[in-house]
Image (cartoon, rainbow, N blue to C red):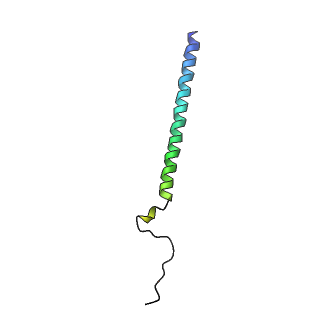
Amino acid sequence: MSTKTSKTSRSSSSHGRKALIQWLAVGVVVALGIVAAFLLSDGNSAVGGHSGAPASANQNL
């Protein structure tokens, strides 16, 4: 009977470890998504605000 209890305990700790790893993986994916959203959003507005449009010279002097 003690082997069954030991096996159940081992299985339970293994399940807990797998669940922890899965939650950590979800946390890493969420963190990377937040970083990517921050970097891919309009982050250049504070630096110089270049929109990517070609520069045009003013012809009316």
- Residue found 52% across the figure and 29% down from its top: 17
Percent position (x, y) of residue 59? 47, 88
- Residue found 49% across the figure and 46% down from its top: 31
Q: Residue furthest front?
A: 60
Q: Residue furthest bottom?
A: 61
Looking at the image, is 38 positioned above or below residue 8?
A: below
Percent position (x, y) of residue 34? 49, 50
Q: Is residue 4 left or right of residue 58?
A: right
Q: Which quadrant of the rendered structure holds the C terminus?
A: bottom left
Looking at the image, is 30 positioned above or below residue 38?
A: above
- Residue found 51% across the figure and 74% down from its top: 53
Q: Residue furthest top?
A: 1
Q: Which quadrant of the rendered structure holds the N terminus?
A: top right
- Count up the numbered dots: 0
Q: Residue furthest left?
A: 47
Looking at the image, is 53 positioned above or below residue 24?
A: below
- Residue found 47% across the figure and 55% down from its top: 38
Percent position (x, y) of residue 19? 55, 32
